[in-house]
Image (cartoon, coloured by chain):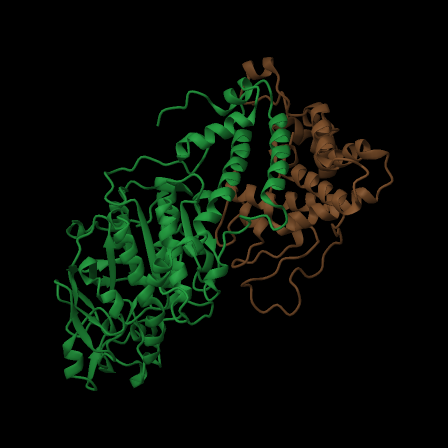
Amino acid sequence: MLDYLAARLIQQNWSVKSLLRELVLTRTYRLDSSHDQLGSDRDPDNRLLWRMNRRRLDAESLLDAMLSVSGRLQTDLGGPQIRSGTTNDYNYRHDSNRRALYWPVLRNSLPELFRVFDFANPSMVTGRRENSSTTPQALFLMNNPWVLQQADHSAQRLLGHRLDGDHGRIQLIVRATLGRPPTPEELQSMLAFVGSENDDKTLRLKKWAQVIQVLFASIDFRYLR
Amino acid sequence: MSQPIFTRRDALGAAACGFGQLALTGLLNTSASAAPSNPLRPRQPHLPPRAKRIIFLFMQGGPSHVDSFDYKPVLEKRDGETLPFDDARAIAKSGKRGSQQLLKKPLWKFRQYGESGRWVSDLFPETARHSDKLCLLHSMHTEGVAHGPATLFLHCGSTNFVRPSMGAWINYGLGSENENLPGFVSICPSPGNGGARNYGSAFLPPVFQGTTMGTAGGPAADAKIRDLVNSRLPRQQQRQQFNLLRSLNNGQLPSNTRDTELEAVINSFELAWRMQSHAPDILDLSGETAATQALYGINQPQTDNFGRQCLMARRLSEAGVRFIQVTYGDGSPNPAWDQHSNLPKHAEHARRVDRPVAGLLEDLDQRGLLDDTIVWWGAEFGRTPYAQDRGTGRDHNPDGFTVWLAGGGLKPAFAYGSTDEFGHVAVEKKMHMHDLHATLLHLLGIDHLRLTYRHSGRDFRLTDVHGEVVNELFS
């Protein structure tokens, strides 16, 4: 396989872009990670790539994904990362809406999302990050003010759309957060949770923000599969 | 540990009432053994443990041992004499030995206390009343002349490399006794002199790092575990939201195969939910009687802050947290006890900690907790018996100082080792910081030689290649 890819790279005039395009357009690359009894019996470790390996969103992707759903993500390139006038990294206030790539990595003040979601310890060399599932992560997704705020922004954005009822809203927000349509069960439980479309606006916003926060905390938001 | 008869998956598959069944099981089985995927589940110790947990009272900056627990009458007699000393800072700076120093007598009168007749100065009259509970280590020595390296050495066993903190090692070695709480809590840690590294997990999985509450210099009344409480939703409403999350996550588990990783994610939410339900009560001091609060000096201006920290430590230890650090310090680069030029300021710090520390010892003792809880009082180093720059304070001294331990498995009314006649250098039965680490791990049932973690191609330990367990301290 590597020999073949090396030959292709040379044939295509050493274009890495072409090589990548070829790779991502393959059937194998576009497989999802769903289970298959035959594959699982013959090759449980997926060495032959009969399916996609499930991938967990790292801290940076989680941050970008939430900002993107809330509509706050700034996608500008380059420029300074640290707020001007900063003299000390202790207690640095991280409140950027830029991509996580542009968030400063300060040894004495990692953003809480980074700290909780296995970002590499900036004081040491880390070859591979941990892949943990911890209580602080769950508490962060359930209670952290920044997460609540992104859910608020997302709810405002969603309710601002002209859509045909809550059914359509759920379709849209589940696609935006999970990249797939809701299952009938998901649709049902979310519809039941948000209550009546005739409720007053404040209550509606509150309920929708809670639903979106639940989507942020759900397995399918935290994994690509 | 025996496997539970029902795995979470079985229970979900079989029970028509879904998570209701699990929630019930959770109520009936509050020990951390319930969930096999919980990385903080309790682990079997190497040795029969003599104690279950440690409360470390960190006196940031280095209180002077010759003004508190290490009585040296010769300092009184020869006060003001100039003598040559091997000063650690002078050696570090220029390599010079035998620098001329001005002996300085203790500023506080020493008295004898208890049946052991232990000498303690008037800095700590309240703690002194508990002399017969203390196991004093007079021959401590350590690495690092400056706060940064010495503080890192105290917490992580290394002055320069990034290493896991002692609490993280213990958390990794033993797990948490209580699944509703973290195994390692640091109350009001300082952001300086190593900051987060002092409660960090370095290369150990991050789940073992310390959970912090508040920050040094901040009011202890506001010290909270981060994100433990939802600022908006009342309990009942959040429960509804949580049930929605449960149903979504449950539906997103693959239905035809076991998936331990995703089950761990689901389990992390269940643990978080339980922690959120229980921990705020544990951290709420308002249910303590007025008498108990008074014991710690709460509601008195000098002692309120540290008193609250100590009472929180007792409540956490009662609830089964393995390692609780309580820091007396501030957020500044010059830590609290660092009296280079103004030694009398020691009195102010002592007033703030003395009653709370004594209260903690008494309270633990009354509740029978002192039998299996170790209280460790100490700092990154001590101070010199001579004045700094011939002035009015004392410089750092890593070559000889005192820390004391009390409780679980330790000899009460005991004093180990000694410094020279001036209190400068540990001479008899020297006890290095590595030895203290090894001994404390041993008391918890951990063999410091066997508590290892493989990183970068080799096994690491808290004590590196050093550390002797000092059996003489054990009761």
Tell me the residue at 62%/29% (across/down). Answer: B247
Tell me the residue at 75%/52% (across/down). Answer: A74
* Whether residue B377 is situated above or below residue A6 in the rendered picture: below
- Name the colour assigned to chain B in the rendering: green
Residue A182 is at least partly visible in this image: yes
Residue B74 in the image, given as x and y percentages of width and height: 14, 78
Quadrant assignment for the C terminus of chain A: top right
Quadrant assignment for the N terminus of chain A: top right
Frontmost residue, A19 versus A225: A225
Tell me the residue at 74%/35% (across/down). Answer: A195
Residue B89 in the image, given as x and y percentages of width and height: 32, 73
- Name the colour assigned to chain A in the rendering: brown
Residue B350 in the image, given as x and y percentages of width and height: 32, 71
* Whether residue B106 is situated above or below residue B360 in the rendered picture: below
Question: Does A86 sit left or right of B375 as displayed?
Answer: right
Residue B326 in the image, given as x and y percentages of width and height: 38, 58
Question: Does A52 sit left or right of B96 as displayed?
Answer: right
